[in-house]
Amino acid sequence: MPIYNRIADFHPELTATRRDIHAHPEMGFQEHRTSALVAQQLESWGIEVHRGIAGTGLVGVLRNGTSKRSIGLRADMDCLPMQETNDMPHRSTVPGQMHACGHDGHTTMLLGAARYLAETRNFDGTVHFIFQPAEEGGGGGRVMVEEGLFDRFPTDQVYALHNDPELPLGEARITPGPVLAAADRITITVHGKGGHASRPQICIDPVLVGAQIVVAAQTIVSRSMDPIDTAVVSLCQFHAGSAGNVIPEIAELNGTVRTFRTEVQDMVEARLGAIVKSIAEAHGARAELAFTRGYPPTINHEAETLRAQAAAAAVLGDNRIHRNAPPRMGAEDFSYMLQKCPGAFIGIGQGDGGRHTVGLHNPRFDFNDDLIPLGSSVFARLVEQELKR
């Protein structure tokens, strides 16, 4: 695969940076060390740095030539609240925190592109290197947009790369339209009447009510939704009781809803609310649903998707680009940036049939360092293609 030779030259340095970030993971809006490391490297290459956007976020600005055209490249920096079980030398040094989604690699790939572009300046226009905090549930992308990201740094188009362990190293998923789902949080609280487990007739059992809600919730997708549409309703936590012979007063259920269209999202919320209320009433209990809208769906713009496909094909090879891959039910807060600016979200494979095929959010996950020069080259190619001299 024709990666940029200059990027290949500093691959060892990029690998050291990636492993350093991996060993020192930081949670959303707490990426102080990572942000400082990124800023120091950008400034050392002569790139203008603007810090303090969404707290720990920053934007590097690189201008060349006279064109008013601009492009944004985004990477996320935060980690997950997980205990790493790998034993390699660069494993996490922070208990209960690890880079289990590859944000250490995304940050490094963007740094590689920034260094190359600062050296070669084979473009005419402005590049915005966007380093975002708090993608893992904190909505750092939303906060950056709300704080005027694209007002302060006017951008014609914006792109992001995300590693994909399910794809072989160097293949890419670049598809127009919806690529990732909206992610909403649901909490159901059931209020019953506690008592001795030997006398259920004088109690109102919230565990029984909650169990029936779990089962009935699955009928929303199978019986209330157009089969052409797609949704997931998953109740993943059920908390109730403190002893095996006590019927508790309260049960709490937590879960997630994933959808691609607002109409489906609204329908799921309405049906789930009706199910919760009616089942509770049928048993003499009371229940409330808290339905919290989360990240919107990630929807690639068609023209920019074609541009991303062309750039990735130039680096990876035309036959290694998946142009009509089905959407996935994961979620991304890059979606907020795509709502404000045309662009595309690119999935790029890191699978090697071995340890780098371990899935995202797994305690044994580790970013594949062989992907670094490929991702950096795709970013660089996008700039040289779209801001052609």
Image: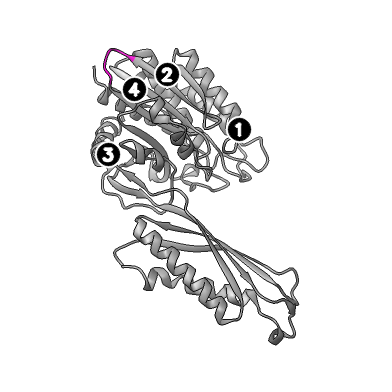
Query: In this image, 241 relative to 114: left or right?
Result: right
Q: Are marks 1 and 4 in contact (CB under 8 Å)?
A: no
Of residues 212 and 291, which is closer to you in this image?
A: 291
Q: Earlier in the sequence, mark 3 or mark 4?
A: 4
For disc 4, the neighbor class at 10 Å (few under 14, some 14 to 19, many from 20) is some
Name the image quarter holding the N terminus: top left
Query: In this image, 236 relative to 385: left or right?
Result: right
Query: Residue 32, relative to residue 231: is it above or below?
Result: above
Q: Nearer the viewer, mark 3 or mark 2?
A: 3
**Could you say where residue 160 lies in the image, as x and y percent from the top left?**
38, 35
User: Any mark on residue 4, and which?
Assistant: 4
Distance from Cα at disc 3 to Cα at disc 2: 25 Å
Q: Are marks 3 and 2 in contact (CB under 8 Å)?
A: no
The residue wearing badge 1 is: 23
Q: Earlier in the sequence, mark 1 or mark 3?
A: 1
Q: Which residues are magenta?
A: 64-68
